[in-house]
Image: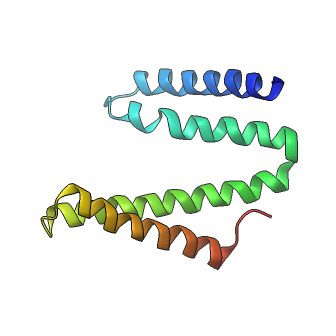
């Protein structure tokens, strides 16, 4: 119960700080970039440092980086399938999801993941 309360408080504080920062920056499109994902990742890593130590968090941070790279490939794939090949949204996202899986698990298999 204490762990969940700690996650709630730390996550809420970090999300609030990133939201304020995003609101202060121009253009306003930065607010979305600085919203939930980076702040939740930082909160999760902060709690993991306390619970598991630095080496565990280092390995976990690499898996977050692999996921971010896979998401970038997914996003580029969806854009290309929608704009260049004129696919509708559902087939484009299904095909691009396969790309995301290949990239994410390929990076994990190739470079390693959590220790």
Measured along the vertical axis of the image, is residue 32 above or below residue 56? above
Residue drawn 48% across the image and 73% down it:
102
Looking at the image, residue 27 sits to the left or right of residue 108; the answer is left
Q: Residue at x 84, y 50 (%)?
A: 54
Q: Is residue 18 left or right of residue 95?
A: right
Choose top left, top right, bottom left or bottom right for residue 25.
top left
The image quadrant where one finds the N terminus is top right
Q: Residue at x 15, y 62 (%)?
A: 83
Q: Is residue 19 above or below residue 50?
A: above
| 12 up-or-down from 111: above or below | above
**Picture coordinates of residue 109 (x, y %)?**
64, 76
Along the viewing direction, whichever of 24 and 57 lies nearer the viewer:
57
Query: Image point 58% across, 35% down: which residue?
Result: 39
Q: How is the protein colored in the picture? A: rainbow
Q: Is residue 87 left or right of residue 19?
A: left
Q: Residue furthest left?
A: 86
Q: Tell me if residue 79 comes above or below residue 30 in the rendering.
A: below
Spot the residue most to the bottom: 110
Q: Position of residue 47 (x, y in %)?
A: 77, 36
In the picture, measured across the screen, residue 115 lies left or right of residue 22, that is right
Residue 97: % across, % down: 39, 63
Please identify the quarter of the rendering in which residue 16 is found. Answer: top right
**Could you say which quadrant of the image residue 94 lies in?**
bottom left
Q: Nearer the viewer, residue 90 or 114?
A: 90
**Image coordinates for residue 62, horizontal then vertical, percent:** 66, 60
Q: Indicate the quadrant containing the C terminus: top left, top right, bottom left or bottom right.
A: bottom right
Q: Tell me how many marks there are.
A: 0
């Amino acid at each position: 119960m204490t762990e969940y309360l700690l996650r709630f408080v730390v996550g809420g504080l970090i999300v609030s700080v990133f939201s304020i920062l995003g609101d202060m920056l121009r253009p306003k499109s930065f607010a979305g970039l600085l919203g939930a994902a980076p702040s939740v990742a930082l909160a999760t890593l902060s709690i993991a440092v306390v619970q598991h130590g630095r080496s565990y968090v280092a390995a976990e941070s690499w898996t977050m980086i692999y996921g971010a790279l896979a998401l970038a490939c997914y996003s580029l794939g969806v854009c290309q399938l929608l704009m260049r090949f004129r696919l509708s949204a559902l087939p484009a996202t299904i095909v691009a999801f396969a790309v995301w899986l290949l990239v994410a698990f390929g990076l994990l298999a190739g470079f390693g993941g959590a220790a």
